[in-house]
Amino acid sequence: MKVGLVGLPGSGKSTVFEALTGLAADPAAQAKSRAQVGSVKVPDHRVDALAALYEPKKTTYAEVVFSDLAGARASAERRSLDSSTIQAMRDLDALCQVLRCFDDATAPAPADPLAELADFALELTIADLALVERRLERLKKEKGDAQEVSALEQMREHLESELPLRCLELRSCDWARFAGFQFLTRKPRLLVLNVDESAAAAPPPPEIAEAAAQAGLGLVCMSAKVEAEIAQLSLDDQLEFLESLGLAEPAKSRFIVEAYRLLDLISFLTAGPDECRAWTIKRGTPALKAAGKIHSDIERGFIRAEVVRWDDLTTLGSEAKCREAGKLKVEGKEYVVADGDVVHFRFNV
Ligand SMILES: Nc1nc2c(ncn2[C@@H]2O[C@H](COP(=O)(O)OP(=O)(O)O)[C@@H](O)[C@H]2O)c(=O)[nH]1
Ligand SMILES: [Mg+2]
């Protein structure tokens, strides 16, 4: 899963990146306006419990890859995004928009997260509209498919009313047909409200929570500066620092929970003396496809999936005990894998 940090310059993207990945901003990447990439292990108490049971050689958490899109520069008169940033955003699974909600003496204006949100939404809309118009022109010249033309005209009208494509139902074709366009206003978007240190533990301001809910966007509140400092500490010191701020966990954990919810992702697990591991899949994935996530050979030679719930396994202590207790299910290709399933795939090699 690739998540990109986007937003206006000075909103705190690089600081959020540091808070999430523990990696400091790389000035060389920034100077070349290149995206900096870092991954975050997804904290998972189920993996920890399985590792305590099996004492495996290796413990592997799921990972989310973040990129800090350093190229997002504003022009002086209009806070517009450059074309390389827009292109980089199209390749992402989700956009995480950082909004400045702290006062910064060096910033050109006081914090106005609602205006930032509206400006940025408009930028995404304009970028998608340009794409739709270019395609329409091409199709008209080439006398292209009438259904596609009609769908694109519907999109144009919708975007011209400043509405995101996320909330458009097409009349003449399926959205799948337009997957290659990577429309920005259809991407899941998570808002990160970057607040002042003094508000690190406060709930988000109600007007922003309301705007996020109305736009159908996820919202996480954090003070990136504080969280970036926390990320540099040892685990013990982290807990102490968090407690002194009135926080129960680092923003990273809340952030990842929100990102999973937004993208409708879940984790299934594999466990044994060699490795205990979490795997990320989309909710609703059948066992056969989940097997392919581990290895294409397992998908190809799939025989069956033996499934136990992680808490049954850690309570009862072994797969054999789960089988005796009737807690082990034998499932076929079509079985829809659930969050927290521990799966043992049987397959032909
Ligand atoms: N007071 C305060 N300053 C912050 C916070 N987050 C970022 N900054 C500062 O704001 C400036 C811009 O942050 P940066 O992460 O470089 O923004 P970017 O342009 O979006 O990557 C830097 O001087 C940061 O130190 C925060 O939560 N509180
Ligand atoms: Mg930056």
Image: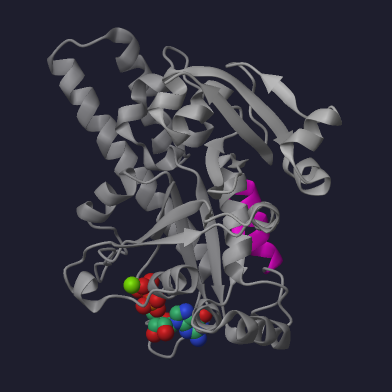
Q: Is residue 147 left or right of residue 341?
A: left
Q: Residue at x 34, y 36 (%)?
A: 182
Query: Which range is magenta?
Result: 205-220
What colour scheme does the image use?
one colour
The picture places residue 19, in percent across and down from the top left corner, at 49, 73
77 above or below 199?
Answer: above
> Is 72 placed left or right of 4 in the picture?
left
Query: Quick one: which residue is furthest to the right in this view?
Result: 325
Q: Residue at x 37, y 46 (%)?
A: 92
**Residue 103 appears in the figure:** no
Against 338, is 297 above or below? above
Residue 212 in percent (x, y) is at 61, 54
Pick the front one: 55 or 334 = 55
At 63% from the left and 53% from the top, the residue drawn is 47
Residue at 18% x, 74% y is 31
| The one of 97 and 256 positioned closer to us in this rendering | 256
Q: Is residue 304 above or below residue 17?
A: above
- Side (left or right) of 59 relative to 107: right
Residue 219 in magenta? Answer: yes
